[in-house]
Amino acid sequence: MPKSKNMFSSLTAWRRRVTQRAVHVGWAWVQRTGAVTAERPGSLRFGTLGHGTRLAFPQGTVFGEPWIHLGDHCIIGEQVTLTAGLMPDLDLGPDPILRIGNGVVLGRGSHVIADTTVTIGSDCYFGPYVYVTSTNHSYDDPHEPIGKQWPRMEPVEIGPGCWIGTGAVILPGARIGRNVVVAAGAVVRGSVPDHAVVAGAPARVVRRWDPDQGWQPPLRTPAPVPIPEGVTPEQLRALAELQAGPDPEEDSSETVSGLGGGVPEVRPGEAAPVVESGGGTSA
């Protein structure tokens, strides 16, 4: 009797493994097939859908596509919402409303709501769940429900080369300069200068680049060391294995720089440094 029970348990486990494998393979096929590209746009008819750009499946809410222009080599993550206009099926005129430059990455679950002009410059990287909107509710009339009052709209512009951290909110009227870091969870309104780091709600500048003095306040971590030309993948793997091993001669609070991904050095009695970017958090 115990032998039969073991056989039944083994068969059940085998079926579960086969079913799990089939589900994973099937879902991978669905994701590949459901992705939107210039060659396979499906039912979406964007004003421009650049070469090498891909919208991962499943997509979020997308409407007003004729007024949405996507550049080349963009990566749009799963469940990203892209909208032009207050609602579907509106005639928004001859000009694009939402412009996204080349090489832009929009992280999973992000929203870009363009009821009036929104421009995102080339090579911007968004962490997950970033919210960009050109529209905000008004509450001028204290007797009328806020949702029934006509919203305010102001254009939004995000310059090229920016990094927008996880959960950041970009409000109507924001003008973000070139190569700006927006910290995770920051709420940005108004103008942000080039080469700055902003954090907080509302966001404020916490670090800026000065042509004469460099970053002010100074960075607490060394700059990453570029990988020299001619280094092979095998050499990089060997170096990573060496760095991963314990070194009794080295203080455990130190980290090896050069390949990135480590935690900045913190010495006893020193406050934790500000994180500059990476992993969906910044500043």
Image (cartoon, rainbow, N blue to C red):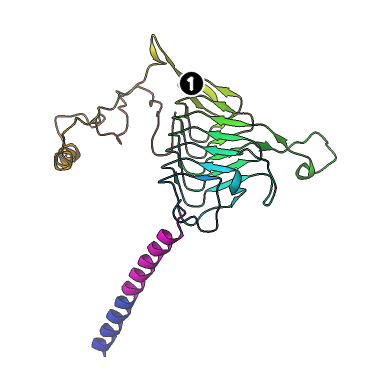
Q: Residue furthest top?
A: 212
Residue at (39, 64) in percent of width and height: 29
Give how far across and how far down residue 71 sits, in percent: 47, 40
In the picture, measured across the screen, residue 203 lies left or right of residue 172, that is left
Whether residue 32 is in magenta: the answer is: yes
The three-letter amino acid code for the residue at tag 1 is Asp
Residue at left offset 51%, top offset 24%? 177
Quadrant in which residue 211 is drawn: top left
In the picture, the quarter occupied by the C terminus is top left
Question: Where residue 64 appears, x then y in whole percent?
Answer: 62, 48
41 or 261, which is in the foreground? 41
Count of marks, rendered view: 1
Instruction: Report the predominant secondary structure element of the magenta stretch.
Output: helix
As drawn, which residue projects farthest toward the front?
94
User: Residue 253, located in which quarter of the rendered image?
Assistant: top left
Per the image, is 243 magenta?
A: no
Range shown magenta: 16-36
Position of residue 39 relative to residue 135, above or below, is: below
Q: In this rendering, is residue 175 above or below 10?
A: above
Q: Is residue 134 left or right of residue 145?
A: left
Q: Based on the displayed image, in which of its 4 quarters is residue 223 positioned?
A: top left
Q: Which residue is mark 1?
A: 194
In front of the other: 215 or 154: 154
Q: Quadrant of the N terminus?
A: bottom left
Left or right, residue 147 beside residue 55: right
Residue shown at 57% from the left, 43% from the top: 68
Estimate the x, y position of residue 213 in percent, counting from the top left: 38, 10
Q: Secondary structure at mark 1?
A: loop
Query: Badge 1, how many Cα within 10 Å: few under 14, some, many 20+?
Result: some
Give residue 256's position: percent from left, percent from top: 23, 31
In the image as oriented, which residue stretches furthest toward the right? Answer: 143
